[in-house]
């Protein structure tokens, strides 16, 4: 759950931008059929099995339009929800319920979708000590929501942004002139409390990374035999992350590896939404 400060500083401005995108001047349709304030209520219904995530953001969308809106939830973030289940009841000015409906559902469906996909992938690593990580492959201006959803789904967050840690990828290595040079330069520049992670693509790069003292070595887009060879060579001298086109369809094949982390951009860039709907709107 987002704390109050995070909501006000980080979340509210994004929701307001989304509402402004949807209502540039007025909600013409709603104002034409509902010219005056009329109290009503509507049900939030689940139309697919999945993991609930984003109730706080869903509610905030309506209360930013009208702080007298009331939302009663019958489930919480992280709960498994099923098709046909009533998740919440929203009460307030019918004009607010209609105008906020799409934006609130867009957030909730997306966040539930990420949490559900993450849960499905995390379940495939059950029984191992491997931590499932997300990446920075997120929807622009929605990272805070998507990374939160990964945690709700049972995954873990990699660095939040470029200010959050050192990760030397192929183009950084190219710019520096090699793996060893990149690690040496990063150690000289970055604060000592920051770990140095480096992305490698073959055994020669692995050897350079170990020799230069990388804290974490990311084995990127290697086949299973290459991964095992690299892991044997590292032999505990650095933490190990496996990455590269990891999805729920292939992650099980990596679960026998003795690595610390597996990262998957698919958690955020390829998860489908979870189908939810606001139904049964009526005046009260």
Image (cartoon, grey):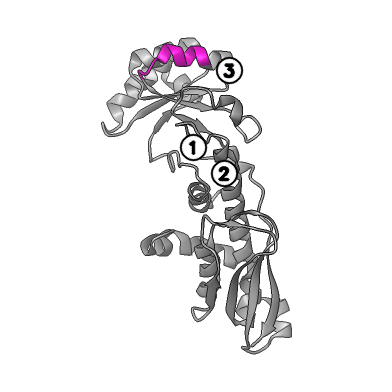
Answer with mark 1 or mark 2, whichever residue precedes in sequence.
2
Crowd class of label 3 (few under 14; some 14 to 19; many from 20; radius 10 Å)? few
For the residue labelled by badge 2, is the local secondary structure a helix, a strand or a loop? helix
Q: Is residue 34 above or below residue 170?
A: below
Kindly identify which residue carries mark 2.
118
SS assignment at label 1: strand
Residue that carries the numbered disc 3 in the rendered image = 224
Residue 55 visible: yes
- Say few, some or many: other residues with alpha carbon within 10 Å of mark 2 (under 14 / 14 to 19 / 20 or more): many
One can see residue 25 in this view: no
Which residue is located at x 44 percent, y 42 percent? 161
Label pair 1/2, CB-CB below 8 angstroms: no
Give the extent of the magenta segment: 228-237
Image coords of residue 80 (percent x, y): 58, 55
Estimate the x, y position of residue 183 in percent, counting from the top left.
36, 21
Q: Label for residue 133?
A: 1
Outermost residue, left direction?
A: 192
Q: CA distance from mark 2 to mark 3?
A: 23 Å
Q: In x, y percent, where is residue 45?
A: 66, 66
Residue 261 covered by magenta stretch? no
Q: Quadrant of residue 211?
A: top left
Residue 200 appears left or right of 268: left
Residue at position x 49%, y 37% in the image: 133
**Neighbours of disc 1 within 10 Å: few (<14), some (14-19), many (20+):** many
The quadrant of the picture occupied by the N terminus is bottom left
Whether residue 267 sits left or right of residue 189 in the image: it is right
Predominant secondary structure in magenta?
Answer: helix
């Amino acid at each position: 759950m987002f704390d109050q400060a995070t909501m006000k500083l980080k979340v509210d401005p994004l929701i307001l931008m989304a509402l402004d995108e949807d209502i540039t001047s007025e909600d013409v349709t709603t104002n034409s059929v509902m010219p005056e304030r009329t109290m009503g209520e509507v049900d939030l219904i689940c139309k697919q099995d999945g993991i609930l995530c984003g109730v706080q953001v869903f509610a905030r969308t309506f209360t930013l339009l009208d702080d007298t809106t009331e939302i009663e939830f019958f489930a919480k973030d992280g709960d498994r929800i099923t098709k046909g289940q009533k998740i919440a009841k929203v009460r307030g000015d019918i004009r607010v319920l209609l105008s906020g409906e799409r934006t609130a559902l867009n957030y909730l469906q997306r966040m539930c979708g990420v949490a559900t996909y993450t849960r499905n992938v995390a379940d495939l690593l059950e029984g191992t000590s491997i931590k499932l990580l997300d990446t920075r492959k997120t929807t622009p201006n929605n990272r805070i929501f998507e990374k939160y959803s990964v945690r709700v789904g049972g995954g873990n967050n990699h660095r939040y942004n470029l200010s959050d840690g050192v990760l030397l990828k192929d183009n950084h290595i190219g710019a520096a002139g090699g793996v060893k040079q990149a690690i040496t330069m990063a150690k000289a520049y970055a604060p000592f409390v920051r770990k140095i992670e480096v992305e490698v693509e073959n055994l020669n790069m692995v050897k350079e990374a170990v020799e230069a003292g990388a804290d974490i070595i990311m084995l990127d887009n290697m086949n299973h035999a290459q991964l095992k060879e690299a892991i044997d060579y590292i032999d505990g001298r650095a933490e190990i992350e496996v990455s590269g086109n990891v999805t729920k369809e292939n992650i099980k094949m990596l679960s026998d590896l003795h690595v610390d982390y597996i990262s998957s951009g698919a958690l955020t860039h390829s998860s489908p939404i979870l189908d939810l709907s606001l139904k049964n709107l009526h005046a009260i």
